[in-house]
């Protein structure tokens, strides 16, 4: 009973066309990604800035005729879905040109196509068997688990980078405080030494 269910899930996974990546976006630069799509294909885009500056970036999507399909400025995260009306190369661009010194780390999830049916006759008039219902339930649970894992990975990466940045700032501040304390101690020693030198000079003058 288990092996046919796993086989169906494996066949479904083989039909998924998705790209997930995390890339660096330097300041004053723009980076674009291109995808050649047929007409009538649905694609979904999810992105999130996980490190750098105010965690924001400009994003826009254009069709093969360079028509603007999506454009947002200084977004921390967002999602966009669209069904293609023509065949050609679609472009997804991320811009950090408004930032003069902050590098950004951006996560991008690009998915194309509709979810394939797990079973050829799942839309038919016949009722699903117990095994088929179990396969569908497992499939939905796996989708939720996958989305949750992605969300937790992004949160973990974002929190880790924030913690590392905070640790670096605390380290630099501690070094600065140590230097200031050392300078103050040397100044106090020199000041006390000058007091004793003045006293010795006054005693020698009086004698």
Image (tube, helix red, strand yellow):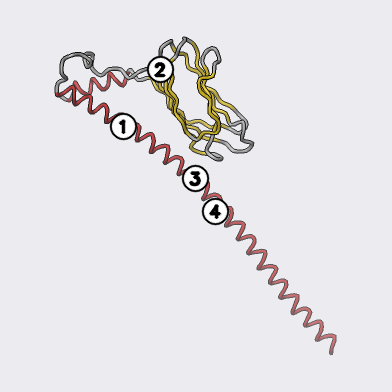
Q: Earlier in the sequence, mark 1 or mark 4?
A: 1
Q: Position of residue 17 (x, y in %)?
A: 38, 19
Write the residue at 27% across / 31% down: 141
Q: Earlier in the sequence, mark 3 or mark 4?
A: 3
Write the residue at 16% across / 15% down: 126
Q: Earlier in the sequence, mark 3 or mark 2?
A: 2
Classify mark 2: residues with Cα within 10 Å, few (<14), some (14-19) or many (20+): some
Whether residues under marks 1 and 3 lie with C-beta atoms below 8 angstroms apart, the answer is: no
Q: CA distance from mark 1 to mark 4?
A: 38 Å
Classify mark 3: residues with Cα within 10 Å, few (<14), some (14-19) or many (20+): some
Q: CA distance from mark 4 to mark 2?
A: 47 Å
Image quadrant assignment for residue 85: top left
Q: Of the numbered discs in the image, which one, if any, rests on residue 9?
A: none
Whether residues under marks 1 and 4 lie with C-beta atoms below 8 angstroms apart, the answer is: no
Write the residue at 47% across / 33% down: 77
Q: CA distance from mark 3 to mark 2?
A: 35 Å
Whether residues under marks 3 and 2 lie with C-beta atoms below 8 angstroms apart, the answer is: no
Q: Earlier in the sequence, mark 2 or mark 1?
A: 2
- Identify the residue position indicated by label 2 in the image: 42
In the image: residue 189, left or right of residue 27: right
Q: Is residue 172 above or below residue 114?
A: below
Considering the numbered disc 3 on the image, is that residue within a helix, a strand or a loop? helix
- Identify the residue position indicated by label 3 in the image: 162
Residue that protrudes farthest toward the bottom in the picture: 207
- Identify the residue position indicated by label 1 in the image: 144
Q: Earlier in the sequence, mark 4 or mark 2?
A: 2
Image quadrant assignment for residue 183: bottom right
Classify mark 4: residues with Cα within 10 Å, few (<14), some (14-19) or many (20+): few
Q: Position of residue 2 (x, y in %)?
A: 17, 25
Q: Of the numbered discs in the image, which one, if any, rests on residue 170?
A: 4
Classify mark 1: residues with Cα within 10 Å, few (<14), some (14-19) or many (20+): few
Q: CA distance from mark 1 to mark 3?
A: 27 Å
């Amino acid at each position: 009973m288990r092996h046919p269910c796993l086989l169906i899930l494996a066949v479904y996974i083989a039909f998924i066309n998705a790209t997930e990546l995390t890339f660096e976006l330097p300041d004053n630069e723009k980076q674009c990604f291109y995808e050649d799509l047929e007409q009538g294909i649905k694609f979904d885009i999810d992105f999130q800035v996980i490190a750098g500056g105010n965690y924001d970036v400009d994003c826009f999507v254009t069709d093969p005729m360079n028509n603007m399909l999506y454009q947002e400025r200084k977004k921390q995260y967002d999602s966009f879905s669209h069904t293609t009306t023509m065949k050609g190369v679609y472009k997804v661009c991320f811009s950090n040109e408004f930032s003069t010194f902050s590098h950004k780390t951006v996560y991008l999830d690009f998915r194309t196509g509709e979810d394939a049916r797990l079973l050829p006759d799942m839309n038919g008039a016949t009722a699903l068997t117990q095994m088929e219902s179990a396969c569908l339930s497992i499939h939905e649970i796996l989708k939720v688990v996958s989305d949750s894992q992605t969300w937790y990975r992004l949160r973990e990466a974002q929190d880790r980078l924030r913690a590392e940045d905070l640790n670096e700032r605390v380290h630099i501040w501690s070094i600065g405080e140590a230097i200031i304390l050392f300078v103050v101690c040397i100044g106090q020693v020199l000041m006390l030494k000058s007091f004793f030198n003045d006293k010795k000079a006054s005693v020698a003058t009086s004698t």
